[in-house]
Image (spheres, grey):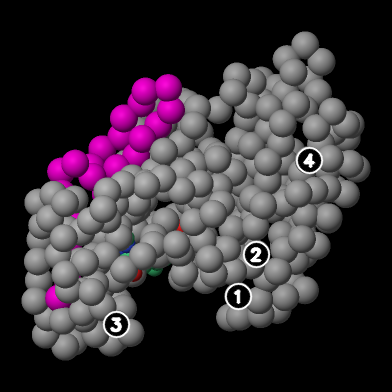
Amino acid sequence: MRPFEYIRPASVAEAVGILSERGEDAFVLGGGSAAVVMLRLGVVRPECVVDLGGIEEMRGLRRNGGLHIGALASIRSLELDVGVRAAYPLLAEAASQVANVRVRNVATLGGAVAYGEPQTDTPTALTASGASVRIAGVSGERSVPINEFYVGPYETVLEQGEIVSGIDVPEPAPHTGGCHVKFTVGSPENKPVANASALVTVDPSSGACTAARVVMGAAGPVPVVANAAGALVGGEASPERIKEIAAAAAEEADPIEDLRGPEWYKRRILRIVVERALICALQRART
Ligand SMILES: Cc1cc2nc3c(=O)[nH]c(=O)nc-3n(C[C@H](O)[C@H](O)[C@H](O)COP(=O)(O)OP(=O)(O)OC[C@H]3O[C@@H](n4cnc5c(N)ncnc54)[C@H](O)[C@@H]3O)c2cc1C
């Protein structure tokens, strides 16, 4: 590994100041689960590494009508937090399916979001949840809806010198059920061949669906919002109808062939994970 200067700022202002001053010579370290590998393999060769780990204001979870998650919150903390599990079960479920406990203890939600890797679980769930990303830079903070945050694989709207400082998740409407389904080959700890998050709201008197959102991961360069899910609203939610919606959703995806399989195979898996996520979310919304 090429030697580099290591800086551990104590505040967001200090971090973005250093990052904007050092420009392309600087590299951000979140939890380090991917960043350390990139440094070791020489994928990145920065002159200085800015470790965000000492910034207290970027830690923790706060509930105030919605959920604010500091960028340094570990994936494991989302999986375990009682309040998140009760009020934002979709997010807790997606977090619980990331890799293994060792990775979940280290990886941060801010890192998972900023990384922009298509094969991740939490961005899929955050997109289905209508989350926004808080971005800090030298000129202040801005908030971007997560479905506008991703530009391509490993590419986001973050400008030079900016960091993800937190994520805001709106509280789900009453009678909403969420479900995250991940399919892997080999070990369940592996990154997904495909995943899907569904968030469905029902009318408690009739059981009819009043809102439905489905997002697919590892399904294209960025999390893919399935327009087909809209057909569930006000319509019939029979098993046959859900199958049709899942098939249409898989057609909206744009998966690539890689070591996890060819494109046709991923589309087939997407159909199945979307169907399962929708059935499960509907059941949860109705109970
Ligand atoms: C073996 C293994 C298996 C995994 N499996 C899964 C899986 O199944 N599902 C899943 O969802 N994830 C999985 N992950 C986690 C995922 O791939 C990333 O490693 C993780 O999300 C990165 O989080 P981090 O905090 O460690 O970020 P880091 O590794 O520190 O950083 C990742 C990238 O984001 C940038 N960055 C970090 N924090 C910020 C910030 N706050 N603002 C701006 N830029 C930032 C860094 O510069 C770097 O480019 C796995 C990881 C490993 C190692």
Q: Which residue, given by chain and number where applicable, does mark 3 sit on?
A: 44
- Verify CB contact (< 8 Å) between mark 2 and mark 3: no
Categorize mark 1 by other alpha carbons within 10 Å: few (<14), some (14-19), many (20+).
Answer: some
Q: Amino acid at mark 4?
A: Gly
* Mark 4 vs mark 3, CA separation in Å: 42 Å
Q: Which residue, given by chain and number where applicable, does mark 1 sit on?
A: 260
The residue drawn where x is 10% and y is 61% is: 8
What element does badge 3 sit on?
loop
Q: Position of residue 104 (x, y in %)?
A: 34, 53
* Mark 1 vs mark 3, CA separation in Å: 25 Å
The residue drawn where x is 30% and y is 60% is: 162
Q: Position of residue 126 (x, y in %)?
A: 51, 45
What element does badge 4 sit on?
helix
* Mark 2 vs mark 1, CA separation in Å: 12 Å
**Position of 278 compared to 139: left or right?**
right
What element does badge 2 sit on?
loop
Q: Which residue, given by chain and number where applicable, does mark 2 sit on?
A: 219
Image mark for residue 230: 4
Mark 3 and ligand 1: say if the CB distance to the nearest ligand atom is below 8 Å. Answer: yes
Question: Disc 2 vs disc 3: which is toward the camera?
Answer: 3
N-term mark: 4 or 3: 3
Note whether residue 107 is visible: no
Categorize mark 3 by other alpha carbons within 10 Å: few (<14), some (14-19), many (20+).
Answer: some
Note whether residue 65 is visible: yes
Magenta-highlighted residues: 48-76
Can you tell which quarter of the image residue 64 is in?
top left
Question: Where's the C terminus, which quadrant?
Answer: top right
**Position of 56 compared to 69: left or right?**
left
* Mark 4 vs mark 1, CA separation in Å: 29 Å
N-term mark: 2 or 1: 2
